[in-house]
Image (spheres, rainbow, N blue to C red):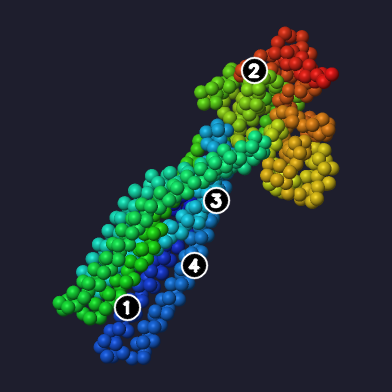
Amino acid sequence: MIKTLGKFFRFCGEENHRKFRLAIILGVVSSLFLALRIPAVYVVIKDMLEGTMTEKTGWIGCGIVALSILLQTFINMKTTMLQTEAGYHAASQKRIEIAEHLRYVPMGYFNENGLGSIASVATNTMEQLANIGTRVVMMVTKGYITTAVIILMLFIFDRRIALVAMAGFLLSIAVSGIQQKIIQPYSVKKLTADEDMITKVLEYVQGIAEVKNFNLFGSKITEVNSAVNLASARSFQMEKPAVLTIFVQNIINKLTGVIIMLLSLAFYLNGSLSLIYCIMMILCSFMIFEALDTAGAYGTLLRAIDICVSKGNEALSSPTMKIDGTDIVPKNYELKMQDVDFSYDTRKIIDRVSLTIPEKKATAFVGPSGGGKTTITQLLARFWDTDKGTVTLGGNNVRDYSYDSLMKNFAFVFQNVYLFHDTIANNIRFGEPDASMERVMEAAKKACCHEFISALPNGYDTVIGEGGATLSGGERQRISIARAIMKDAPVIVLDEATANVDPENEIQLVKAIEALTREKTIIMIAHRLKTVRNADRIFVIAKGHIEQQGTHDELMQQDGLYRTFIREREKAVGWKIS
């Protein structure tokens, strides 16, 4: 238990740890005020038995009890506020830390760890620590502290009774330790089932269009229901042994109270304990383990809290790329690769690639799907680290840049645009949250999306659906271009930016891209002839190699993959129904 509590406090951070320490100290004070009722009652009963009871004694006794209750109530309120504040602050800080940490992990981390697992740690796990974890920790510590304080108070009256109470206390703690070991495997299974449930629900919601299209309701709903039912079953499995150990712990506590009462009567009858002490011991036997019963009930969740903390630490300790380089401002924006190798796990994707992308020129990558085009652009921007070879920007190795100073130089427009569930204005100013509305509108006009935004019910304040689901593909693309224009990065990467856009939107999109790419270093991945033929340099990528390179005219003079690619595209464009 002590190990778990220490692990929890360390995870919460020093500032929140201080609040928890203060809450525990106040818990000790609260327990002292609770224990103060014992001598107050003792004084009153003693005077009553001796026949010396006065009004003054009664008022003093009642006053002490009333003050004890008042101060304990106030301290408990303060303790609850401290623990709640510390718990919620710790959870929110850890969510931000996890989000910041994930910015710097290699992209392979997201392939190895499913979205459900990552989302579960950031949401469900942190929520458990904020709500359940905080209450569990405080109720357990309060229960043990209160019981210990009352037992210490018993030593003032009778050492024999106090030792019996101490033995019951230690036995109860031992059962709690056994309880933690029993439920450990069930706690792990429960959290794993929770992650799987979140994964299945996210898959269902994100793929709802495909589910409808292929009428997969039965199978997909079955998968979701199975995951939900398994999570429920795992929770129940964890509770069953917990209920048994709680029962045993309660029996020990209650029997100890009964033994204290019987021993008190026996000691009184044999003359070794006075009547007043006997009465006080009997009263204490009813209250001594009350707080410990509550601690035992909450203690079953300590193991789950321990695992939640481990999950959070695991996310925060996932290996990151080297990010603490130098804040470099490159002297130019020429990009180079030299003998670069890269693999996904054991599958080699890029094999000894060397290339140069001149500053303020347009460079295109073409070739069959899966050939490595997108991977090369991601290596240039250091979404991944190379296995071998070097990548440089402005003559400096990209690993020598601090990650933030490197990313300032790149803006991306992807084929599949992701927009956030927020206003259009906030999506455009995503990289610069404090940008003025005038700058947002200026970027939108350059991206040819001001007109359709203005026609929306709330204009720039229109809240769009998650992922931009309420907008057309062309509209989403233009908003992403406006976002890139706002960033004003010197290197622009266009990954199939016009692939899924209808002809009407394409005209507007091409104008937007022209506004974005003016006087920039351009890297484009495209299949359309008119997109690549005007590039200053074209690289044909296949099977992780550079098969050909040159201008459009130069490559058309060669018998190779590029000429075949272009002729196939020309035939496809010219095809029509007779």
Q: Residue at x 61, y 32 (%)?
A: 383
Q: What mark, if any, has residue 542 been given in the picture?
A: 2
Q: Earlier in the sequence, mark 2 or mark 1?
A: 1
Q: Residues within 10 Å of mark 4 (few under 14, many from 20)?
A: some
Q: What mark, if any, has residue 93 been given in the picture?
A: 3
Q: What mark, if any, has residue 39 been given in the picture?
A: 1
Local secondary structure at mark 1: helix
Local secondary structure at mark 2: strand
Q: Quadrant of the C terminus?
A: top right
Q: Earlier in the sequence, mark 3 or mark 1?
A: 1
What's the CA distance linking mark 4 and mark 2?
66 Å
- Describe residue 299's horizontal placement relative to residue 93 as left or right: left
Q: Amino acid at mark 1?
A: Pro
What's the CA distance linking mark 4 and mark 1?
25 Å
Q: Residues within 10 Å of mark 1 (few under 14, many from 20)?
A: some
Q: Position of residue 167 (x, y in %)?
A: 25, 62
Q: Position of residue 130 (x, y in %)?
A: 51, 55
What's the CA distance linking mark 2 and mark 1?
87 Å
- The residue that disc 4 covers is 78
Q: Earlier in the sequence, mark 4 or mark 1?
A: 1
Q: Earlier in the sequence, mark 4 or mark 2?
A: 4
Q: Nearer the viewer, residue 134 or 522?
A: 134
For the residues labelled 2 and 3, say whether their Cβ atoms are less than 8 Å apart: no
Q: Amino acid at mark 2?
A: Ala
Q: Nearer the viewer, residue 267 or 551?
A: 267
- Describe residue 482's horizontal placement relative to residue 290 as left or right: right
Local secondary structure at mark 3: helix
